[in-house]
Image (cartoon, helix red, strand yellow):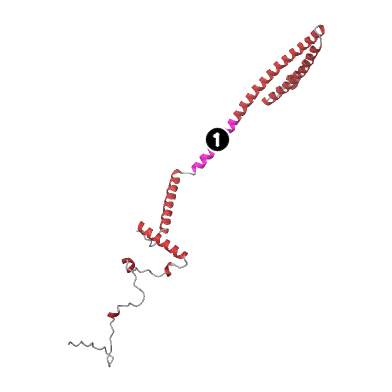
Amino acid sequence: MQRIFGVKKQKDPAPSIQDASDRINKRGENVDEKIKKLDTELARYREQIKKTRPGPAQEAVKARAMRALKQKRMYEGQRDMLYNQTFNLDQVAFAAEGIKDAQQTMSALKAANQGLKGMMRSVKVHEIDNLQDEMLDLVDMSNEIQETLGRSYNVPEDIDEEDLMGELDALEQDMESESQGVPSYLQPDKKPDMEEELNLPSAPAGPAVGPPERANVQHADEMGLPAVPRAPLRG
């Protein structure tokens, strides 16, 4: 049967976008090389035109330069066309890559969706609410315990500003006395001086001396008792 009808030829696989882009880029490189060669020829023709005098020789150089310029413009048109094709292929390749990325993203989202559904089955909202309520109760109980343990015992709370200033003055006096070398608790208590309060003059030092005519001198009798003064006799 194969001899009669022959064998079906296998079709070559369709070229990919990357293959077509590479092929066009190679063609563009070849066209660029030809354009560079023509630029070199045109530069040489320009120098010859400058050096030759007007006449048939200069006209022949101009004709060759004109043909080179026409070839250059033709190659430049082909290069622009190839660049446009490459640009279109790049756009198609970008769109194809975007579609592939979208497919991968959809596959990842589907897998994540299935996983989330499986995890959500084991998580219940009311259990989470109950757990939060229990945690709040435990935190409140802990705060109450801390406040209870932090209470002070027998600490007076009825202290006004006058008591505070008195305590500060006492502390200042203690610091002054300690700086002089004698603690406050070893210093003697100061009693109020009545003379200082009444501003009385101080008493003179030494025994008091009265007038000589008023000196009271007592005499003793034989028994050692004070003698009775005798009354003067009236004449």
How would you classify the magenta stretch by its main secondary structure?
Answer: helix
124, 202: nearer the viewer: 202
Q: Tag 1, which secondary structure?
A: helix
Q: Is residue 88 above or below residue 168?
A: above
Name the residue: 64% across, 26% down.
93
Name the image quarter holding the N terminus. Answer: top right
Q: Is residue 57 magenta?
A: no
51, 187: nearer the viewer: 187
Q: From the viewer's perspective, is 144 left or right of 95? A: left
73, 208: nearer the viewer: 208
Neighbor class of circle 1 (other Cα within 10 Å; few <14, some 14-19, many 20+) is few
Q: Is residue 123 above or below residue 233?
A: above
Q: Is residue 103 magenta?
A: yes
Q: Position of residue 101 (x, y in %)?
A: 60, 31
Q: Is residue 17 above or below residue 107?
A: above
How many labels sit on residues? Answer: 1
Name the image quarter holding the C terminus. Answer: bottom left
Name the residue: 80% across, 10% down.
61
Name the residue: 74% across, 13% down.
69
Q: From the viewer's perspective, is 184 left or right of 50? A: left
Q: Which residues are magenta?
A: 101-121
Residue at the left extreme? Answer: 235
Q: Position of residue 63 (x, y in %)?
A: 78, 9
To which quarter of the image does residue 16 belong? top right
216, 49: nearer the viewer: 216
Residue 1 visible in the shown view: no
Q: Position of residue 153 (x, y in %)?
A: 39, 62
In this figure, which residue is indicated by the disc labeled 1?
109
User: Amino acid type of disc 1?
Assistant: Leu
To which quarter of the image does residue 5 belong? top right
Q: Position of residue 208 (x, y in %)?
A: 33, 77
Residue 32 visible in the shown view: yes
